[in-house]
Image (spheres, rainbow, N blue to C red):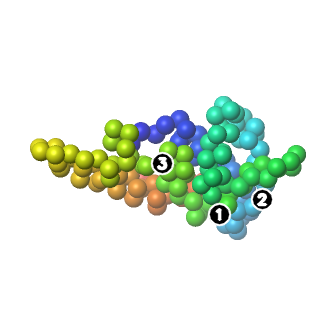
Amino acid sequence: MYISARADYALRAMLAVADAGSTGDGDPGGELVKAASLAERQDIPLSFLQGILLDLRRAGLLHSHRGTEGGYALTRPPGEISVGDVLRAVGGALTSVRGMPADRAGYHGVATGLRDVWLAVDGAIALVVDRTTLADLLADRAPAP
């Protein structure tokens, strides 16, 4: 699995929004975070971040409020948004083989078993990223290596 700058930035942005919007009771809400503030605090180019925020909004992970008092907030509590949700929102499939999702890789002859290897890799990655939530990361409870 390759972690792109886009995926890394998306997770950092989501964590910053989750942290700023934390109300202490596990519900989304609290402070709205402006894109410019996110970009500055996380050292992410603003123009690049805006595209990422759009993808996260389209995936239903963020909602935005317009206006001078506007900004971004999570659509669900941080404990209900997994790292896998964010990665899929900005990058599609978790693993790819020659640019296609692992389940679409096809082989013949002596290489037939490779598809099973790629699917196992995809499953192992999904196991880690789908069970790790934003709340886990905010509480420094990431899975051990």
Callout 1 amino acid: Arg
Residue 123 lies, with reference to residue 51, above or below; the image says: below
- Please tell me the numbered disc located at residue 30: 2
Depth check: give the residue in front, 110 or 25.
110
| Residue 4 rendering spot, x and y as whole percentages | 49, 37
Depth check: give the residue in front, 35 or 98.
98
Residue at the left extreme? 110
Residue 34 lies, with reference to residue 82, above or below; the image says: above
| Residue 66 rendering spot, x and y as whole percentages | 82, 49
Q: Secondary structure at mark 2?
A: loop
* First reached walking from the N terminus: tag 2 or tag 3: 2
Question: Is residue 138 rendered to the left or right of residue 88?
Answer: right
* First reached walking from the N terminus: tag 2 or tag 1: 2
Residue 28 lies, with reference to residue 6, above or below; the image says: below
- Please tell me the numbered disc located at residue 76: 1
- Please tell me the numbered disc located at residue 92: 3
Neighbor class of circle 1 (other Cα within 10 Å; few <14, some 14-19, many 20+) is some
Does residue 89 appear anywhere in the picture? Answer: yes
Q: Secondary structure at mark 3?
A: loop
Question: Is residue 58 rendered to the left or right of residue 117?
Answer: right
Q: Are marks 2 and 1 in contact (CB under 8 Å)?
A: no
Q: Quadrant of the N terminus?
A: top left
Q: CA distance from mark 2 to mark 1?
A: 12 Å
**Looking at the image, which residue is at 54% across and 45% down?**
90
**Looking at the image, which residue is at 69% across and 50% down?**
17
Callout 3 amino acid: Gly
**Looking at the image, which residue is at 16% across and 46% down?**
108
| Residue 87 rendering spot, x and y as whole percentages | 51, 49
**Looking at the image, which residue is at 71% across and 59% down?**
22
